[in-house]
Image (tube, grey):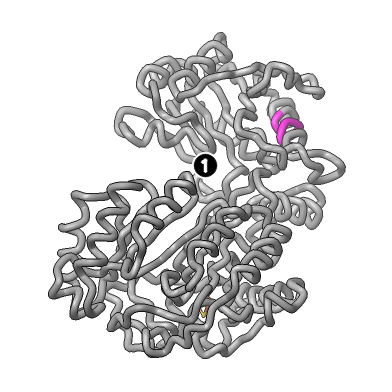
Amino acid sequence: MSMKTIAVIDCLKNNRFSREPLFGGHSAERLCADAVVSALRLGKIDGSVVRLAAAPEAAGADGIRTVAVSATDAGGYFEALTKITEGYDVALRICGDAPFINPDLILGTIKEHTETAADFTYGEGFPLGLCPEAIETDLLPILAELNRNAPLPHRSLFPYFEKQINDYDIAVVIAPQDSRRLRLSLFADSFRRLTLLTRLAAASNGAVTPSFIAENEKLLLVPPAFYPIQIVDARVQTPIYVPQALSAEAGSGAEMSVESLRLLLRRAEEVSGSFVVSLSMNCDPVCHSRFFEAAQAALESKASAVLIETAGLRWDAERAEALTAAAAGRLIWIVLLDAGTEEDYRKLRGEGFAEASAFAARMTVAFPKSVYVQAHRLKGYESAADAFYRVWKPKTDRLIIQKHDSFCGLVPEMKAVDLSPLKRFPCHHLKRELPILFDGTVPMCSEDLNRTVLRGNALTDDWQTLFASVLRQYEEQVDGKYNGICGGCDEYYTFNF
Ligand code: SF4
């Protein structure tokens, strides 16, 4: 029996990047719509295409019927979809800023969905943005009822099934090669992603497929997403698990000026568009004499989030609260506690348990979504992490349990469990971060305390020189060459932003 199918191109959350030229003068929105229309035509699918847009005037110049949807929650969204898809058996949902939505995967998803008589079908192991999702239309009114006040869908409908996964028949289109480790989102929704999509489209002559990506990993390096910045060369404590170079005693106290920080952030905006910045690379930012001005400068930049990692000591808590309140969710705190009891704390971090715990508790109560507390799970000290969990779990769900970082062997390994992948792959930090020390020096990464590789100076050098150095090393790693300290590194698979 042939199933009547409607392809729903969801443009509700598209931003300006989806409308900028990407390939052959066409935008991501246009490429996406063309791919969907041609897939249905090629597959002789009995159905039609509709576009969801936030504004009623956004009629498609390509002849695709455009429907304005003004839902404010998932319930309203599914209700609108129920009406739009009336008379069809299956709705294929595609994000409208996915220029490389793959015609073969569109047809493959319809086939899998139909043959397995599934309620919902999605792709697994593909870069995001290549494979659509399919849903039985008679489920839509049920989802509308179940999701009143739930957030509107964005990339995937899967979260709406996840909660009661056993109640549904779910089918999966499996990628021949699992590319999840690449963490690729092929949506035109930011400057960085548009840069990548444009490069991939040009290199493939518009035919970006899963196999093209697998064979061209060297093309995947884009401007940094995360800037860890050392605003001061100082720490307030010496935890037992850090190298001597990161002890409180080793800090020179030298500071990055707020003016230099502003300059760096302007350059970061130019090359990355938006990004996340940390003011805590290998330091405790509380030690900076003008910390609040520095944080203010970061908040005035285009950073989507500003990260402060701290021991939680010596803070003017009132000013910290005022700054966090004014940041409206963009300032994220991570308080490094490592222990739930004074005894454990003293063993692991030294003095200051009561002050650090009180600061973390106060900030957690005031800003439950913006404040994290962190502990390391260390060999020989597992009970400290357990006690930390017992104390903090009732107070917040923002808990981070970190593995030990030996800084490529600078300190003896204290990892309690081995989470490293079986097969080595290019480093996430190399690919996504540009670390900058207090004087503008760009080391290879936060691990490289002995500065075995220096890329240049971010305050005085052309950033293209810095990126050329990153690219050389990234290409080596794609070729399986892990030179220098990278060879013994256990951080390459950890992911920040
Ligand atoms: S592999 Fe390790 S040492 Fe090399 S760049 Fe990545 S984090 Fe740094």
Report the residue marked by disc 1. Answer: 123
Q: Nearer the viewer, residue 261 or 93?
A: 261
Tell me where the magenta segment starts and ends, as one range.
31-36
**In the rendering, at what x and y percent does residue 413 appear?**
32, 84
User: Which residue is rendered at x = 22% and y = 78% of the image?
Assistant: 351
Q: Residue at x 46, y 85 (%)?
A: 488
Q: Percent from the top left, x then y, of residue 451?
A: 56, 88
Q: Farthest residue in the right direction?
A: 25
Residue closer to the observer: 210 or 127:
127
Q: Main secondary structure of the magenta part?
A: helix
Q: In this view, does 482 lie above or below 263?
A: below
Classify 409 as above or below 5. below
Q: Image quadrant for the N terminus?
A: top right
Report the front residue among 453 and 259: 259
Percent coordinates x, y for residue 426 in the rendering: 56, 71
The amino acid on which the numbered mark 1 sits, given as a three-letter code, is Gly
Q: Is disc 1 surrounded by few (<14), some (14 to 19) or many (20+) residues within 10 Å?
A: many
Q: Which residue is drawn at 61% across and 86% down?
A: 453
Task: Please indicate, yes or no, whether residue 215 appears anywhere in the rendered image.
Answer: no
The stretch drawn in magenta includes residue 35 = yes
Q: Residue at x 77, y 34 (%)?
A: 30
Q: Does 62 appear in magenta? A: no
Q: Quadrant of residue 169?
A: top left
Q: Does the residue labelled 1 lie within 8 Å of ligand 1?
A: no
The correct choice, above or below, for 464 with respect to 175 in the image is below
- Examine the rendering and report whether any part of residue 257 can be seen: yes
